[in-house]
Each structure stands twice: as C-alpha cells, then as structure tokens.
Image (tube, coloured by chain):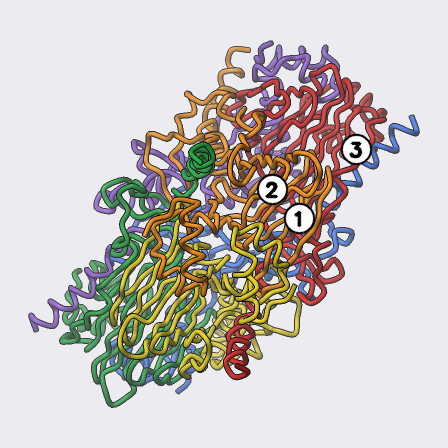
Chain colours: A green, B yellow, C blue, D red, E orange, F purple
Amino acid sequence: MILPLFFIFCLLSSTSQASVVDFCVADYAAPNSPAGYSCKKPAKVTVEDFVFHGLGVAGNTSNIIKAMVTPAFDAQFPGLNGLGISLARLDLNKGGVIPLHTHPGASEALVVIQGGITAGFVSSDNTVFIKTLNKGDTMVFPQGLLHFQINSGGIPALAFVSFSSANPGLQILDFALFKSDFPTQLIALTTFLDVAQVKKLKGVLGGKN
Amino acid sequence: MILPLFFIFCLLSSTSQASVVDFCVADYAAPNSPAGYSCKKPAKVTVEDFVFHGLGVAGNTSNIIKAMVTPAFDAQFPGLNGLGISLARLDLNKGGVIPLHTHPGASEALVVIQGGITAGFVSSDNTVFIKTLNKGDTMVFPQGLLHFQINSGGIPALAFVSFSSANPGLQILDFALFKSDFPTQLIALTTFLDVAQVKKLKGVLGGKN
Amino acid sequence: MILPLFFIFCLLSSTSQASVVDFCVADYAAPNSPAGYSCKKPAKVTVEDFVFHGLGVAGNTSNIIKAMVTPAFDAQFPGLNGLGISLARLDLNKGGVIPLHTHPGASEALVVIQGGITAGFVSSDNTVFIKTLNKGDTMVFPQGLLHFQINSGGIPALAFVSFSSANPGLQILDFALFKSDFPTQLIALTTFLDVAQVKKLKGVLGGKN
Amino acid sequence: MILPLFFIFCLLSSTSQASVVDFCVADYAAPNSPAGYSCKKPAKVTVEDFVFHGLGVAGNTSNIIKAMVTPAFDAQFPGLNGLGISLARLDLNKGGVIPLHTHPGASEALVVIQGGITAGFVSSDNTVFIKTLNKGDTMVFPQGLLHFQINSGGIPALAFVSFSSANPGLQILDFALFKSDFPTQLIALTTFLDVAQVKKLKGVLGGKN
Amino acid sequence: MILPLFFIFCLLSSTSQASVVDFCVADYAAPNSPAGYSCKKPAKVTVEDFVFHGLGVAGNTSNIIKAMVTPAFDAQFPGLNGLGISLARLDLNKGGVIPLHTHPGASEALVVIQGGITAGFVSSDNTVFIKTLNKGDTMVFPQGLLHFQINSGGIPALAFVSFSSANPGLQILDFALFKSDFPTQLIALTTFLDVAQVKKLKGVLGGKN
Amino acid sequence: MILPLFFIFCLLSSTSQASVVDFCVADYAAPNSPAGYSCKKPAKVTVEDFVFHGLGVAGNTSNIIKAMVTPAFDAQFPGLNGLGISLARLDLNKGGVIPLHTHPGASEALVVIQGGITAGFVSSDNTVFIKTLNKGDTMVFPQGLLHFQINSGGIPALAFVSFSSANPGLQILDFALFKSDFPTQLIALTTFLDVAQVKKLKGVLGGKN
C-alpha cells in the first residue's frame, strides 16, 4: 500500500498550499495593508491564535462613564485578521453609559447577557431608533451611524457585541471633540456649541487648544 | 427664522434620500438578490426591525444531539439584511453536541456565556485546531471549514456566535449525508464509509435511498 | 456577405445580453436592494441617464450655515447606481460652514474650485488633521470619520466632492442631535452636554423632546 | 423516537431558510440589480439550473473572423448568478481570430483543449505580453485589459475560458468602433485613424454614420 | 516633433505607475495578506508569469481514489494572484472518484473534456443535486457546499474546473476526518460514526489518535 | 480625578489600535498587495499625506493631443491608498482630445469646470452614448468601457474626474496599439486595420515592430 499512500500524499501536498488562505493569522511584525495585517507563516500558527481570553474579564468601570469597552479586534485577536468579523465586551455599571460613538468600518450586533440596556442610533435622515433591551435581546446598529448604550436596569449590565469587520474602528464623539487637540474655536464653529460648553468638557476630558 | 429654517430643510431633504442606504430592512414579500432581500420602504421601518427577541429563549435540547442552534440570520432578523453580520444562540445540555458542520458563506466567532465548551475546526491541510473554552472565552472559525462544539463542562452550556455575513448558511455534515436523499451507494463511494454504516445512520436521521 | 454577417450578428447577439451588467441605471419604481436600485431595462436607457445637470447650479446659501450641499448620489443620478461612485457640490458663502458630519458608507475626496477652504477630520485615536486648501488643492477624508469644511478665504468658495460609493449617506452631527426627536435627557447623558445647551440648539434647529 | 426526530426537524427547519443564500438561481422575469438577477424561489430550483449544455456544441466559425465565442454567463446559465464565475467556449478554425477585446468586469483564464493558440494582452503601461499556447496550457488575462487569441496551429483550435464574474461583459474593439453608430469623424478624432480606414471597416462590419 | 513626443511621454509616464494595479504577480518571498501575495516588481514581470503549463500533464491516478486533482491556484500560478480566479485539472481513471469535499473560499465551475462524470452537491437544506455530465457539459457548485465527482463513463475522464477566487482552498472530507490527528472519540461524537468505522478509515488513510 | 482619567485613557488606548485601519497611508518603500500599498506607521502620518497639490497646476497641453491627464491615484497621492477613490485633472486646449481609453479597474465621474466638452462611451452591445457637456455638467462612464473626451467649446476646457478605485488604471487605445512593441502584423490581424495605417500611426507615436 506504499504506492497508493504516496500518491495520496501527492494529492494532499499538491493542494495543501491552498490552506494558506483558509486564514491569515496576523503577524504584527510585518507590514499591514488595506486588507489587514500580513499573515503569520502557517507552520507557526497554533490554536491559541484563534482563541481570545480577554473578553472573560470584566472591564474596570471605575471611570467617569461607569462603563468600559474591551475590544477583540484584529489588533488584539490575531486569528480573526482578514475574516471580516470582530468582537467586544461592554460592561456598564449602574448608571453606566457608552457615549455616542460610531464604528467607521462596520455594522454592529449587540446581545444583552445581563441586566437591562437602553440603546439607540440615529439614521442619515435624523430618525432616532431607541429601544430598551432585556437579557437575551439583540439589536443591530448599521455601519457608521451614531449610537449609544446606557444601563437602564437596576444592576450592572453586560453585553457582547460583534462587528462586520476585523477592525471596525471606534470614534467616540466626546473624545473626538473634547479629548483631542481640535481647536475650541473650530469646534464651536462646526458644531454651534457655545465656547464655554466646549471649554468645560475639554477641562473634564483633557482636550487641548 | 422662517427663511433659514426653510433652507435648512432644503439641505436636509436634499440629502435625506441618502438615508435609504444606511440600512436595507428585509422586505420578505419582494424578490431577493445575491446581495440579500429587497429593502422595506424607509417610512415603514420601525425600531422593532432592528431588535430580535428570539435569542433570549433557551433552545429546546430534548433531541438526539442534546443541543439546539437558534439562528438570527437575515431570514429571521430583517434589520441585519445587507449589513454583513448575523447571530445565533447555541444551547448545549449536558452531553450536548453541535455536530461537525460548515458555514459556506461566513466566518464565525463564538463567545461562551455559561459552562464549558470544547470546540475545534479542521483546515484545508488537515490540521486540527481544538480548544476547551471556559466562560468568557472566544474562538474564531474561519469561513467554510468543518467545525464542532461539544459541552465539556458538568452543566448546560450557552454560547452566542456571530457571523461575517447576514446569511452564513449552515451545512450539518450528518444531515447532508444521512438526513437527505443522497443515495447510499454514492455516499459510500464518495466517503469510503461502509454501506452498513450509512444505512444505520440514515435509519436514525431519516434519510432516504 | 449575407452569411458571414449573419454569423457575426450571432456572435454579437450571443454576448450582447452580457452588456446588461456594464451598468445598472436605477429604476426608482422597482425594489432596491443592499446593492442599490433595480436596473432599468437596457432598451429604455438613454445618454441622459448618465448625465446630471444639478451640480451646475449654485446652491442657495441664504441659510444659517451660509452653505449648501447639493448631492448627486444614486437617489438623484440614476446612471451611477451600482458603479461605486457619486458626487456632490459644496457652496460656501463668506463665513460658510459645512458642520461636522460623517458619510457612513464612503470615503470622500474634495477639490477646491474657487476660494479658500479649511477642512479637517478626526481619526479613531482622536488625532485631528486640519489643512487650509487653495484653488486646485485636493483632500481626502477616510470613510466614516467626522469632518468639516469652512470658508477660510475672503470670497465665496466652491468645491466638488466625490465618494467611494453610489450612496455614501450623510449624517450631520447637529441635525442628528438637535434637529431630531432625540430626547434631550438622553442627549445630555450620552454626550455630557449641558441640558441648557441641548435645549438652546434644539430651539434653533427645530428638534423635539 | 418521535419526539427527538421532531426536534431535529426543528433544528433543521429553523435554519433551512439560510439555504436560500447558498445560491441565487436567476429569475429572468424579476428585476435585476447591480449584484445580479433576482433569485428563483428555492422550491422551483432543479439540478438543471446548475447544468449548462451549450458549451458542448462547436460554435459556427463560418464567419469573417473564422471564430466564435459561445458564452455561459449569468444571462445564459441561471445557476451561476451571483456566484462570481462564468465560462465561455472559444472555437477558432484555421486562420481564426478572436479580435482585440476587453471584459470590463472580470479577469479571464484560458485553457487550450485542442490545437495551438497565440494569445496576448497589453497592460496600462503599454507593455505587450504575447505567448503561443499548446494543448493544456493556461493563460490569464487581467481584468479590463485589451487581449486577443488567434489560431496559430495547423488545425482548428478549441479553448474554454472562465471569468471572475458571473457577467464579465465583452467589448470587441472593432465592433465598438465599426459595427456601431459611432460617428466616423469622432472615431477619427479620438483614434487618429484615417477617415478612409474607418469608412472601409464600417463597410465591412455594418457600422453607421 | 521632439517637443510633442516629449509631452506625450509625460502623459504616458505620469500614468504608467497605474499599471502596477493592472495585475499583482505573486512574489512568494514577500509577506502575503488576506488579499493575497505581495506583488512582484512590474519590471521583473514576464509573460511566463501569466502562463501555466502544469495543467497539460495528466495527473497520476495510480492511487486509492483512481483520481488526481492538479491545482493552478495562486500558490502555483503567480500571475493570477489577486485576480479572483483560479483553475484545476481533474483526472478520473475508470472507477475514479473525487471524494466529497468543499472549497471554503470559492464557487466552482466544471467543464467535461473527455468521458462521462456524475457530479453532485448538497445544499444547506440537505437537498441533493446530482447530474451525469457528458463531454462539453458544464456544472456549477456554489461556494462552500459539499460536492463530489465520479467517473461514470467507460473510459478515463478529464475535466477542467475554475474557481471564483485565486485560492479557493480544498477540504476533502475523508482527509479532514481520517488523514488528520482528529481524535477518534471526537470524530465519533461529532459525526455519530461508529468508532470501528473511524478506526478502519484512519488505518487506510493514515490518520492518528 | 486622576483615577477616572486614567481609566478613560485605558478605554481610549484599548481601542486606539483600531484607528490603524481608519486609513492606510501608502508606504511606497514596503511591498504592495492586490489591496494596495502597505500602510505607513500611524505615528508617521501627517495631514500632508491626505492633501495633494498637483491638481492645482494646469497640465501642459503642448503635445499632439493638445490635452493632458494629471492623475492623483494611489501611486501619486498616498492618503487615498485603500480608500476606493482617486482623482485626475483633464486639461483640453482648443481642439484638445483625450483619445479613446479605458480604466480597467474603475468607473469614472467627470465634472466640467470650464469650457465645453463632448464626451462619450460605448457599451458591450456597441451602443454609443455621446453628450456635449457644459460648465457644471456631470457625466459617468461605467467601468472598463471605451470612452473619450474632446474640447467642443471655443475656449480651453478643464474638468476633474474621480474614480471608484484608488488605482483605476488607464489604457489609452492608441498607445496600447501604436506606442508599444505590439507587432504590426498581429495588430492588423486582430483589428482588421490596414498594415499601412498601423505603420503610419506607429511612426507618429513611436511604436516598434
């Protein structure tokens, strides 16, 4: 049976290079491209590349928003590089708020695991879609639209979210405006906010100019 | 201020048609296309289209696999039509097994919510990646590859999975072979399984021919 | 030559159906899908479907922002349906401002035709990129990121912008917050803005709740 | 065993809608979209939708180019609608020529089945890539570039080509110029060809104006 | 004419860099990414990069399946890197079988060149589509679905297949299960196959554990 | 407030890696891939990467076509690498002509800034779409189709064009045929042009063979 097995091996090996593209585990040391990170050599890939433990740890919510976003994007989770999907964990303590934000590169789906969450988004025609979600409820937020989540139950809330990209991006409105070096005068001019309001929030969040 | 408000309204209305494409809530009564279902008229869209309650209900695991997959794909959850993402709930009772299967159209990310799950997949070069996951652990399964999940804890297990497509498809190996009208002789010929084995499993799963 | 010409006609006709997909001129009366509008029957397509005259007319800037965006998206310009590109005209009078906004579905490239424009965007890590542009200068704004344009010259400014999608969407931050029925308390909670500030701007822009 | 089988059926049915998107067999009577034709109802799909017999018949080469292209695009082969692939058969009699042409929407791969074929394409930097191919040789033509095939063996040649789109389109240079109503003066102006040359070829191919 | 030719050269050179993206011939020595291999420098590209001779040689069918798959994927054929298409040759001797397999990353189109082939696939709702194909017949297999080909004629069969990706992957069911180190107990648990059956096939195919 | 600010910083930093993919400014020194150039390290990115001044300079039209195309593709404008959009400037002096050409990888949208332009394209079924455009008029040219622009006003014309790809490519018909080393006999054979005509144009444009 040596001969047949040899040729089966041929069949196998002649196509095994194809497996390179079953996945492309991120090699953070090599260049990345618009399609994602370069691929680690298949021989160096292990099951640990496809497993992420970071979402099992509660995010620290001792902060001003009483909430924490823990991402598992391709920058943190090498195995999902190029696979068009990523995840994050949302911890919202009592009174916790995930402020208005967008994901420039992906749509989001949220599942409530514990507690109650009121979530909403605004569409391009300025329609507001808001819903209070209970354990097990799911809500989807279309790509690039402003959305928020707040704890609306009496207990700490937990949710997992997934995204339609390995790297959805995250632009938090308040951080973009008030935690950056966006000049106060330009913010006022392009948002109609009062200068005093802008300065007040820059004071809290640490923005400059 | 009538005049300015009028022109602001112009600015608004001149672009509000663009909101059509912020999302495309599935209209199941209209034709679908390779890109998904037709879009419901924006005026008929409500927040309920973006919310799904079906994943909050435990799947019935009183079946031969002691497990249940509850999908929230575009066929069940109209709001994620065209958004490139979908979800499912996995309930695995003690001894529960999600048999070997593939998603022809998407990669999958799994988060363990309760219990312990041993999961694995096989790549094109026949390497097997298997890992036992605990609460909060995440694992990714690249598109189209055979994979499985089994309850490896002492208690019922719960996981949520998400997919990189609004309709990932689900091909369960045993159902494709033994719950279909795939002729027994052809199965034996194309899998090397013994005819007796094929007939035995067809008997259990209800396949014909 | 009758015979050969007949067969040439065969060659032609046997493949001419393929031309259906050279383009897909929008049929606004038929269903649309996540990929865009349905296609008008090729026999009904004329050159006018591929030509748009609306960007030749100066937008009316007698409004609160002293500026106007005139879109040529697939909802206005049927010929670019499905082609992955669209356009708009920006008129900025002296002191004109295009307030902070995003395009959820596309990247943008701007060309200054007349006057001077100061433009900027903020990235996900809250870095601000601002530049004053003169006639003929081009600037690109990556998909989904907050950006603005203001007239920084002494004369009315004109720019044309193009997008990497036939329907990029347009979410104007102030309209999403203050021209919508987004409840004031929720805005305050998810933006840290003072309630008085929110109410003031709702008064100007006509928002409710 | 009724009960378990019932629940297996639930598992099956709860996900069987997903199969809609395994494929989208073209329904030529319904609207088409930029993504392809609408999908035939799964219940009406048969194996014949996935099989095409037209490429088994030699194309008639009794024409001016002594060659024939027989397409199996989505307009002819409903089963490959939306699958991103299509086929064609090339028959080249002795002296047969497939004139310079492009496929606006796809790359092409050619396999020589019989005879000898000299093929070539020109890249954007005007480099010419020409090769004489024998039986079993394969050549790839990148998307949208001008290319040709001629019979360079002593016998009739046969090749099968495949494309990276269900509808690659086919623009034959001579037909675009000389079999259309492209005004002779405009052709001369935009190609530098002599008017006499244009008129001569319009006479042969039947072009107007 | 020196001056004009100089400026024509400018026009040419100013855009010739664009040719970089007409194609991206694989540079196997550089990193690859989710989009494929890095591109060889255009100056080093020759026509041989776009031609592949390997499909002209009959595959050796002196093996257990009396068949051979010879791939021309991007790992073997550098010129089709990034072009969204690839090819393979199928040789099926008398009694030859291409066992049940999937292509995780592409749809497949098959053309019968010689002999008779019976082919089939199973969809997500466990419908089986089987057809006996003769010389010149074409069949399409949607992405990611289990399918097979067997020689059903009295003579050796030859087919060429093409794929909707430069690297479709190839997962052969029997090799994934019985030629890998997939533990026998886990296979039995996730396929319902008898342990004896699994051990028997591992013995034939060389699987471990 | 140190503590909360510290954790806000955590929230920020934990996700700031995601910003890598907001954009991928071209690093011309690193490998490129089918998806575009490698990304410059975010720390090295400046606003100048997103701004291009080259389109502000009139192209030199003292050449045989009395016209010039000035591209701002990813090869010239690093900031639009991977963003799916690019630009070019068209200068057409009196009598200027952009000869028949295609963009293999993108659709094009044109805006007339000054003067009058007559533009047209030919579809796969050899229908010709021609229109005379005035200042402010826009016309779209579907991907990969032959098209042209000529100055049809009494004054020099200026237009800006945008493309649905960061690198659309540009294949000028006359340069492909008559400014290359495409053998004269093969051109004649594959275009039906007279050898004398081919030689005449090669003499003007500098083609060989």
| Relative depth, front residue between E102 and E205 | E205
The amino acid type found where label 3 is placed reads: Ala
Provide residue B145's location: percent of width, then percent of height: 43, 54
Helix, strand or loop at label 2? It is loop
The amino acid type found where label 1 is placed reads: Val
Name the residue: 47% across, 57% down: C91
Q: Which mark is residue D58?
A: 3
Q: Is residue C77 above or below residue B21?
A: above
Are discs 1 and 3 both within one chain? no
| Relative depth, front residue between E29 and A153 | E29
Q: Quadrant of residue A16?
A: top left
Please rate how many residues cluster around mark 2, counting C-alpha atoms within 10 Å: few if below 14, some from 14 to 19, many from 20. many
Helix, strand or loop at label 1? It is helix
Q: Quadrant of residue C191?
A: bottom left
Name the residue: 65% across, 39% down: F119
- Badge 1 is on which residue? C21
Provide residue E20's location: percent of width, then percent of height: 45, 30
Q: Which mark is residue D105?
A: 2
Chain to which the residue tagged by mark 1 belongs: C
Name the residue: 33% across, 71% down: B151
